[in-house]
Amino acid sequence: MTGGCSQTRVRVDASLSIHRQSRSSFFQTDLRAPRTQLFRSFSSEAKVNDNLRNIAVIAHVDHGKTTLVDKLIQQCGGKTENERCMDSLDLEKERGITIMAKCTSMMWKDKKLNLVDTPGHADFGGEVERVMSMIDGVLLLVDAAEGPMAQTKFVLGKSLARGLRPIVVINKVDKDSSRVREVENEVFDLFSSLDASEDQLDFPIVYASGRSGWADLVQDGPRQDMSALLDLIVSHVPPPKGDVTAAFSMSVTMLSSDTFLGRLLIGRIHSGVAKVNDPIHALNMAGQKIEQGRITKILYREGEQGILPLESASAGDIIQLAGLSKASISDTICSVEVEKPLETIAIDPPTVCMTFSPNDSPLAGKDGNKLTSQLILERLQKEAENNVSIQVGTLVPGCAGESFEVYGRGELQLGILLENMRREGFELSVSPPQVVFKEENGVKLEPIEEVVIEVDDEFVGSVVNKLTARKGVVCEMKESNEKGRTRIRMNVPTRGLLGYRSIFFTDTRGTGILTRIYLEHQKYLGNIDNMRKGVLVSMATGKTTEYSLKDLEARGTLIVGPRVEVYCGMIFGEHSKETDLDANPTKTKHVSNVRTTDGKDDLVQLKAPRKFNLEECLSYIMEDEVLEVTPNALRMRKKELDPGKRQRASKNKK
């Protein structure tokens, strides 16, 4: 076994040597020479618009995509008054992550560059998948210290499958912890493991610091600006292909809206020319006509926020088109004589499911103004139109109205949806995330995720033990680039990761890094024991008191403080034992004529309650519990509020 691994390593090293030689010869080539001398494969391709390039920036979360885009816009003469200008949503600004893919245009010399900024978190992988049909090249960003991570593998695999030839940008090379040569080797190994072709393996490498605003083709270059990267984009990325003389057709990739124009359909023109007032119709994936109309407006985005009109656009252009009100993502917008829809890219299946229901708690209706199941359904259907990785499933009858099964990629994605809904005034209750199983040939399959963990050496044992108890399998364990830290790669079933993130950060004292990505569906691995302790459940309705809570602190960890409104069946703390405990947190001191002089009654000091954000609540609740979500509160509660009914149901279950 050892000898075989050694031979494989020798072959990889040999390939890497050849790759470096070819890359070295590329960098020695004069970039001002004709492109036919640089990339001969271009000569055989029909160029529709040689002055246009469509490219996406892809990477793992926090590797610097959006910051790099800021600097590219600035280099091309655009203005970016704020950092992360492409993160326009409120939640993106608050959380510091990219949630929705966005496209902008810029002019570099005589070339127009359409640049798409994509999310880096695995839960928003659907955003990356759907933009792949719009682009002809990608910038793959890799952190010079962390190297390729889970999402790096996912987005690279999608781009290689589309036949794209990535430009690798090793970002943050000016960090003290950077390890550029090792990361180069890891990137090449990743390309090889994903069965990249010879052309794809011959990728150029750019060394950059997005925050400092420079990029160079050699590591010890002048480090002045981003011009070297922009020149490389123009020379390496092929111009878009398509038949300008054919009938107009475009596949819808993203949606937007305008107060005056209505729905805006965003996509890349596949063929032909679009002109204002041209008659068009929309076809779904089955070829059925959805609606017919005329193009009322053609728009494109330039720089940070400038939306400019166009009279016409041709094959290869990425545009925003107004004039239709029903067409959605994956539909084909085309001339009326076209009857066959364009093929759409396959989207990976959802891995988790949650049930959305109207709020039926005793405190329902006090915060929000959107309470009915009909309003919830309309909002979910609107989200499913805009987000291809969200699916609204079957309707489930409930006591407060109909409930709806919602499928997504992960807890974070569904949590973002819930956060947006509560800010819009919705009140609802949601079940804990459940894993989506499959069945093939009578065999039950479950989603497996690849988990990459980086922790201090002292926490390795605790992390591995917890994940192996959740049916995880260690695939690789090696020393990290930082001294005293270890990187672990494991395959863990998705259901084993539900609720684990908060445990992970507690076990590692907030110093660990955990990333995960869907791998595949595998055979069901068996039951997983309950890994959470019991909870403290209120058996009374009213406001909590210091007098009652001070006695209950010894029974567990409180999650509410004094003078908080609770009701029977609401969870107000975590029990120190494995079982649930019904208790009264609203009890007050008996009033009598006895007076004390030592003042002890006024010296009640409670510990600060444990606070949960929305994602932590979703991962904490169990099958017999739900989360009540309102604009001003998050309350975890039992599905059955009556303690007597819960006890009888528990006995019958045993």
Image (cartoon, grey):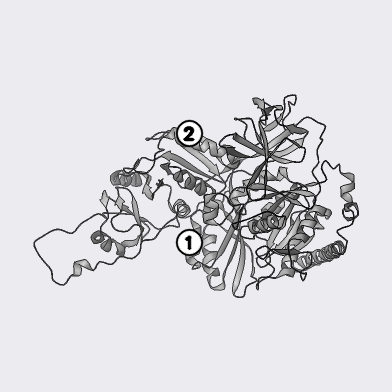
Whole-angstrom CA distance, mark 2 to mark 1, is: 33 Å
| Residue picked out by circle 1 | 503
Residue nearest the viewer, comparing 30 with 442: 30
Query: Could you tell me if residue 325 is visible in this image?
Result: yes
Q: Residue at x 87, y 49 (%)?
A: 41
Expressed as whole percent of the image width and height from the top left, the position of residue 468 reads 54, 61
Please tell me whether mark 1 sits on a helix, a strand or a loop. Answer: helix
Q: Residue furthest right?
A: 37
| Residue picked out by circle 2 | 395
Query: Could you tell me if residue 59 is visible in this image?
Result: no
* Amino acid at dot 1: Ile
- Locate residue 442 relative to residue 399 in the image: left or right: right
Q: Which residues are magenta?
A: 336-340
- Locate residue 386 relative to residue 269 in the image: left or right: left
Please tell me whether mark 2 sits on a helix, a strand or a loop. Answer: strand
As for residue 576 lying within the magenta part, the answer is no
> What is the chief secondary structure element of the magenta stretch?
loop
Expressed as whole percent of the image width and height from the top left, the position of residue 552 reads 28, 61
Residue nearest the viewer, comparing 161 with 475: 161
Position of residue 40 relative to residue 454, above or below, is above
